[in-house]
Amino acid sequence: MTTQPAVLETERYVAALHAGDYTGHDMAHLERVRRLAMHLAEGGDVDRLVLTLAALLHDVEDEKLGREAGLVARHLDTLALDPNRRAHVLTIIGETSFSKHRSPSTLESAIMQDADRLDAIGAIGIARTFQFAGSRGTALYDPNDATSAVAHFDDKLLRLADGMHTERARQIARERHAFMVSFLDRFEAEWTGQDI
């Protein structure tokens, strides 16, 4: 199977699987991550097919979404990929999640981590945080609740910029991080009434 049909088949697969997703892990997220990954990969010696497939498939088995294990491997088996490429896609996906605390073992994996984490910060990251919280019935903000949507910024989002692997990602992350800090300052001012 050539590169283009493998990508098209994967696009169809994830579009159907993520249809109706309102947690911030929808097809738009996958497309943004793919676009970011391709931007970060420019000029680098990377396998773009592997990176594209990983970007499209990285949330298929995300524990937060409650899907069974093995879905990605079964999909890859339908693409007749070279075994090394198949294994590489699975490795990248296994190393992408922030919660698993895994270091990237290849440049493609480093790029994928950066791309996924860039989509978790900045304006889109803020919107996705509140979308996910709303989908789970999580409180918007409670200073005594470490599980509130706003608490997620301290738990994870404000730590992401410092962990970027590529220089391009670090540059993008600096601006997105600054925007989140500004947003949180404004949020606090409005929440407490300091702005009136």
Image: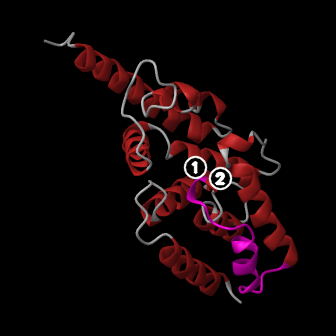
Can residue 45 be seen here? The reply is no
Q: Which residue is mark 1?
A: 116
Whether 137 is drawn above or below 29: the answer is above
Whether 108 is drawn above or below 89: the answer is above
Please report the residue visible at 69 percent of the width from the left and 50 percent of the height from the top: 96
23 or 8: nearer the viewer: 23
Extreme residue in the left direction: 196
Secondary structure beneath dot 1 equals helix
Residue 112, numbered label: 2
148 or 122: nearer the viewer: 148
Q: Where on the picture, by quarter, is residue 70?
A: bottom right
Packing grade of label 2 (10 A; few <14, some 14-19, many >=20) is many
Secondary structure beneath dot 2 equals helix
Q: Position of residue 49 (x, y in %)?
A: 68, 71
Whether 131 is drawn above or below 25: the answer is above
Q: Which quadrant of the rendered structure holds the N terminus?
A: bottom right
Q: Relative to residue 82, is residue 125 drawn left or right? A: left
194 or 165: nearer the viewer: 194
Q: Position of residue 116 (x, y in %)?
A: 57, 49
Whether 151 is drawn above or below 19: the answer is above
Please report the residue visible at 21 percent of the width from the left and 9 percent of the height from the top: 194
Find out whether the residues at labels 1 and 2 contact each other: C-beta distance under 8 Å. Answer: yes
Name the amino acid, label 1. Answer: Asp
